[in-house]
Amino acid sequence: DSGVTQTPKHLITATGQRVTLRCSPRSGDLSVYWYQQSLDQGLQFLIQYYNGEERAKGNILERFSAQQFPDLHSELNLSSLELGDSALYFCASSVRRGEDTQYFGPGTRLTVL
Amino acid sequence: SQQGEEDPQALSIQEGENATMNCSYKTSINNLQWYRQNSGRGLVHLILIRSNEREKHSGRLRVTLDTSKKSSSLLITASRAADTASYFCATGEGGSEKLVFGKGTKLTVNP
């Protein structure tokens, strides 16, 4: 158990819908990262927050957005969902930023029908 | 984009044998990390090696890093069926705070 929690574990929704994925980092970790894992694209970095502020952006679509709240939990919002958004979404956290080990949560499996 | 590329893509061995996986990357890095993922589950951090380190051990794991060749290897000794999983290398690119993952090596350890 990495100490990173993600909810929900599974999510099934329809195209065009909007969902919110939630992540609670390990106690004391200030950085939160979001990754998407799909069969064709592999593990892709989406976005990073550090202590409430956006630090880095990766291959994140404009339909996706995220935020980190004062209690350091983070939410990833996915809107206007398409079939191709079906994937595993992972959250990871680290103490500081950059050169630290990232600890991954169990993931949220999103299925868009 | 994929930074680390693992080789081989798949590896099947018998219990007790050693398993070696390789990772190549393209740009300068701060560190290189290896992760394990059991089918459809979360990634488990195995080991981190910094750019100024050449070798690191953790239990049955041995990681080497050759920055001149931009490559790393992960050796699992005396493998067990429970080691069956996908193994990913991930690099922290110089100046960047994100991890860039390879596509992974799928290891199968047959009992």
Image (cartoon, rainbow, N blue to C red):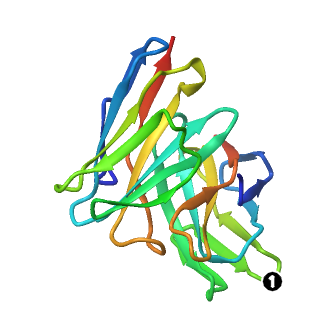
User: Image point 68% across, 53% down: which residue?
Assistant: B102
**Left or right of A56, for residue A49:** left
The structure residue drawn at horizontal position 76% and vertical position 62%, both measured from the top left corner, is B22
Residue at point 56%, 52% (across, down): A58
* Whole-percent x, y for residue B18 in the image: 71, 60
Which one is in front, A31 or A81?
A: A81
Q: Which x, y percent locates residue A78?
A: 42, 31
Instruction: Mark yes or no: residue B41 visible.
Output: no
Q: Quadrant of residue B23?
A: bottom right
**Amino acid under label 1?**
Ser
Depth check: give the residue in front, B62 or A105: A105
Q: Give the total number of marks visible in the rendering.
A: 1
Left or right: where does residue B52 sit relative to residue A97?
Answer: right
Residue at which label 1 appears: B68
| Residue B68 visible in the snapshot | yes
| In this view, B58 is above or below A64 | below
